[in-house]
Structures are given as C-alpha cells and as structure tokens.
C-alpha cells in the first residue's frame, strides 16, 4: 500500500521515501519482513508494530478524527531536516480519520521513564544540556511551520485556574485536603505576566517519556498533542513545552524516590541541577540562531504549576497510581518556599 496503488477509501500521505525492507543481501528479498510488537512491558496508548527492524507502524486505536497535529508537524520536520526524531515516512488515512503513522525504527531505544530515572538514581545530569539543545532545535524548526495562530489572545490564567479547580474536585483523601490547604498559594502562581513571546507550533506533550535514547543519540517522538487537554490550540508560547519538560524531570525524581529508593533531598537537588543545565543549553541554542525571543522565562513557572494540576487530573481519570508524582512535586515546591 505504501509503495504502490492505494485501494479506494484509503489515502497515503508520504513524507520521506521508505527504506528498503529487503534482507541484508542487496536486492534479495526472500520473504515477508518479520513483524513484532514492543511487548506487554511497554506502556502505550496505541499499538505499534516493528517491521523488518527498520520501520514502526503505529496504529491509532481507535482511529483519530482529522485534523491531527502529526500530519502538519511530521512533514514539516522532514522538510526542514530536523534530525532528532524517528524519520517520518508516511500516514495512512481512511476518509476523515487517521489510521496509522509510519516512522523509522530506532535501535536500542529506551524512553525517558527508564534512562532518565537511571540518571536520577546515579545523580547524573550529563543528559540535560543535550535535551535543552534538542528542545531548542525542535522549536526553531516548528517556529517556521506556516499557519495562523489564534487572532485573539489566549486566556492562560483562566485555563490554568480551571485546571486547578478540576484537580481540587478530583483529588480526594489526605492529598486532597493538603491540596486545598495550598490552593490559594498555587492560584497566585497561575497567572503568567503579559508577554510579547511569539506563538509557535509546539509539540504539546513534551515530557521525558517522549524522548528516546537510542543507539545514535536522543530523539523526540509522538507529535499527537496533549491527550489531557481537549481543544488546546496548537500554537502556544514555547514556554508551554519547556514547562512540561521541566516538570517531567521533577516527576523522574519522584519516580526515583518511590521505585529506586533515592533519598528525597538528593533527588530534589538532582532535578534542580538537571533543569538548570537544560534551560541554560536551551537559551544558548536559541541565542546562537538569533531567536532568544522565542522563550519568555517568566511564563515557565505558571505553566509548570498548571501542568502539575493537569497531572493530578490525568491520575484521577486514567492512572490513579500516578498521583504520587505530581503530589510529590507540589509538596517539594510548597514546603521549600
């Protein structure tokens, strides 16, 4: 289907040429390339199949109505030569629904909920400047994606306040009582100042779990948008992605505390150092390209607080065992002020 005629009712959008799926001997295709999934140990919303150890087909389960952000972002990254992602090959559609995305397979890849937790356990922050540079390169590319940001300014304070209100309703027990006790302090941090930062196309769900460490380096994946925010405009300040990435580093510290026995104080120190090194590298990269204007650092903290509220909402609605991570981050913030 990807290489020849497409049956009626289906559509294939091709971004980059597919690699050969022949076996090692050039031109000697001795059978159908082997397929495998990632196994039950990989937590994924959709279903991915590795074909011939060269291509990944991610079947969206269920198919997603259009428009879908990946159909804009992936071909743009291919056109601009952004190197830090799995090569985007094609998308399969049926009518007004996206069925599957086809990308390159990255050998020996692990996601950030593994490699970054290992780094937290060993107090290693060498990865942080690499992540900062990668995120800046991503935003430099996405900032050139044609499109129309919303004509009217977005009400970030209202959006954040709604998230806090929902988190307060959904978080029960002692955690809920504690959250209520600090709600006014959190609310005071939720309003970002007026800013002239440009709105760009953002990743929308940029956390360490979307950063693979593989045989040849690091790669960002999953340009599907934020599954916890319905109707979010794809054009946001770059600080939105940056805040989500920094909070995910804080979540890694909480995972290391809970699952690896790391002491809370060293874990918090590791997170603070990793965030600082990442942000420094991000700023330097933007400055090197004359685009320091893309990031307004005053927006990071309000977006971080909002993100933790959204993590609590996600935990309540989809993954209750995850609550410990955002609660641990919020307690660390509030108790160290």
Image (cartoon, helix red, strand yellow):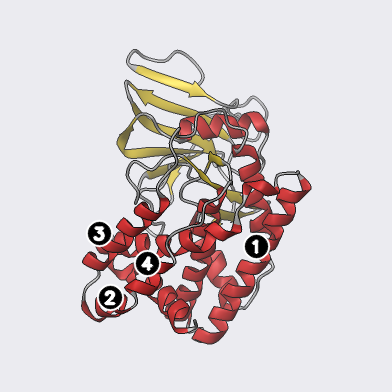
Q: Which residue is label 3 attached to?
A: 317
Indicate whether 10 appears above or below 42. above
- Expressed as whole percent of the image width and height from the top left, the position of residue 210 reads 51, 53
Q: Which residue is label 4 attached to?
A: 187
Residue at (60% x, 25% y) in the render: 17
Q: Earlier in the sequence, mark 2 or mark 4?
A: 2
Q: Are marks 3 and 1 in contact (CB under 8 Å)?
A: no
Q: Earlier in the sequence, mark 4 or mark 1?
A: 4
Q: Is residue 227 visible?
A: yes
Q: Which residue is label 2 attached to?
A: 180
Q: Earlier in the sequence, mark 2 or mark 3?
A: 2
Q: Quadrant of residue 177?
A: bottom left
Q: Which residue is label 1 attached to?
A: 278
- Distance from disc 2 to disc 4, alpha carbons, whole Å, reads 11 Å
Q: Nearer the viewer, residue 11 or 40?
A: 11
Closer mark to the observer between disc 2 and disc 1: 2
Indicate whether 293 appears above or below 246. above
Q: Is residue 111 visible?
A: no
């Amino acid at each position: 289907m990807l290489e020849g005629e497409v049956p009626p009712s289906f559509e294939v959008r091709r971004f980059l040429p597919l690699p050969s799926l022949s076996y090692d001997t050039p031109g000697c295709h001795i059978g159908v390339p082997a397929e495998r999934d990632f196994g039950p140990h990989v937590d994924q919303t959709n279903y991915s199949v590795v074909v011939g150890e060269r291509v990944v087909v991610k079947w969206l389960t269920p198919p997603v109505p259009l428009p879908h952000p990946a159909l804009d972002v992936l071909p743009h990254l291919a056109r601009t030569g952004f190197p830090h992602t799995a090569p985007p090959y094609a998308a399969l559609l049926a009518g007004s629904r996206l069925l599957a995305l086809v990308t390159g397979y990255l050998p020996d890849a692990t996601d950030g909920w593994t490699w970054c937790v290992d780094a937290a356990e060993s107090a290693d922050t060498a990865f942080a400047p690499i992540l900062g540079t990668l995120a800046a390169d991503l935003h430099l590319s996405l900032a050139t994606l044609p499109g129309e940001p919303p004509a009217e300014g977005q009400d970030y304070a209202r959006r954040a306040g709604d998230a806090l209100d929902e988190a307060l309703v959904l978080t029960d027990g002692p955690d809920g009582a504690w959250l209520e006790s600090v709600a006014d302090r959190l609310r005071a941090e939720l309003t970002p100042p007026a800013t002239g930062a440009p709105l760009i196309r953002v990743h929308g769900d940029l956390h360490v779990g979307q950063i693979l460490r593989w045989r040849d380096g690091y790669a960002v994946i999953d340009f599907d948008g934020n599954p916890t925010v319905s109707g979010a405009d794809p054009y946001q300040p770059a600080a939105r992605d940056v805040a989500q990435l920094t909070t995910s580093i804080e979540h890694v510290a909480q995972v290391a505390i809970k699952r690896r026995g790391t002491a809370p104080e060293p874990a918090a120190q590791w997170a603070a150092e990793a965030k600082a090194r990442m942000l420094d590298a991000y700023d330097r990269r933007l400055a090197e390209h004359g685009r320091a204007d893309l990031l307004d650092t005053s927006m990071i903290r309000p977006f971080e607080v909002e993100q933790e509220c959204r993590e609590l909402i996600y935990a309540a609605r989809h993954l209750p065992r995850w609550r410990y991570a955002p609660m641990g981050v919020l307690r660390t913030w509030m108790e160290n002020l």
